[in-house]
């Protein structure tokens, strides 16, 4: 059974204080690992897809990295508008549920001004 | 604008009264799915569809039905809702081949009393 564990559950940072969110996973043949951002009362918004160990992707103050067992979402010099819940999800390479995503419970990030 | 539209956004109903939550996407995506989101449990897949007239169970299908008569629409049906179905529901869509990004609707907050 595919499993995704995110830590910490909640994180409070001062504006400009860089940090990292962790996503550890177990999956039968990783097809892709996804990061989403979710604002209160809204649906998840796609950020990144990572496909293989060693891959990195960046978008503004966010950088996602992937190893064989975990992914990190690095936030550099965060701003209050980066406050949100960040979700990690994996997609298995098996053909049965072609696009099923298994989600972690998320990390709720609060950036204080 | 590419989007997934769910209706209603909020719904309060009584136990046993049949209801339908609609979902429509304008991106010609083959794959559509329904998730429920509960505190501490993350997003869990209820049902998915790989194309018209092709549907299958996700991780938590009990008490739900779906249909896919048209490519753009994927309604979620609760024939006899119970209080344990009180949750935040999201519809999502993506291409079956090629790009992996899943687009999510804004969510439907359902309360069953």
Image (cartoon, rainbow, N blue to C red):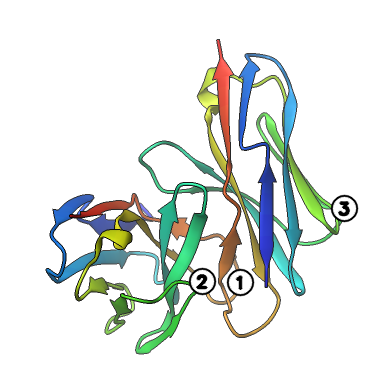
Q: Residue at x 28, y 65 (%)?
A: B23
Q: Considering depth in this image, is B78 or B98 the residue closer to the camera?
A: B78
Residue position marked by numbered label 1 in the rendering: B98
Q: Residue at x 30, y 79 (%)?
A: B65
Spatial separation of the CA atoms under disc 1 and disc 3 = 22 Å
Q: Residue at x 37, y 76 (%)?
A: B62
Q: What percent of the width, then of the height, locates residue B110?
A: 25, 54
Q: Are marks 1 and 3 on the same chain?
A: no
> Most extreme residue toward the bottom, as rendered?
B53
Q: Are marks 2 and 3 on the same chain?
A: no
Name the element at disc 1: loop
Residue position marked by numbered label 3 in the rendering: A54
Q: Which of the labelled discs sits on residue A103, or is there none?
A: none
Q: What percent of the width, then of the height, locates residue A45?
A: 49, 47
Spatial separation of the CA atoms under disc 1 and disc 2 = 7 Å
**Discs 1, 3 touching: Cβ within 8 Å:** no
- Locate the C terminus of chain A by quadrant: top right
């Amino acid at each position: 059974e595919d499993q995704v564990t995110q830590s910490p559950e909640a994180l409070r940072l001062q504006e400009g204080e860089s940090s990292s969110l962790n996503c550890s996973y177990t999956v039968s043949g990783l097809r892709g690992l996804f990061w989403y951002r979710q604002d209160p009362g809204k649906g998840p918004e796609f950020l990144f897809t990572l496909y293989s160990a060693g891959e990195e992707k960046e978008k503004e103050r966010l950088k996602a990295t992937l190893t064989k067992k975990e992914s990190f979402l690095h936030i550099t010099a965060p701003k209050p508008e980066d406050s949100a819940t960040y979700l990690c999800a994996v997609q298995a390479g098996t053909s049965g549920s072609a696009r099923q995503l298994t989600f972690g419970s998320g990390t709720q990030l609060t950036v204080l001004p | 604008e590419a989007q997934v539209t769910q209706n209603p956004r909020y719904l309060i109903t009584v136990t046993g009264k049949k209801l339908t939550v609609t979902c429509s996407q304008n991106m010609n995506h083959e794959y559509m799915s329904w998730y429920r989101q509960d505190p501490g449990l993350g997003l869990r897949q209820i049902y998915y569809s790989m194309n018209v007239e092709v549907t299958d169970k996700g991780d938590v299908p009990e008490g739900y039905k779906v249909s896919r008569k048209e490519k753009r629409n994927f309604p979620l049906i609760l024939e006899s809702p119970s209080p344990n179905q009180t949750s935040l529901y999201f519809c999502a869509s993506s291409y079956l081949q090629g790009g992996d990004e899943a687009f999510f609707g804004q969510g439907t907050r359902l309360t069953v009393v």
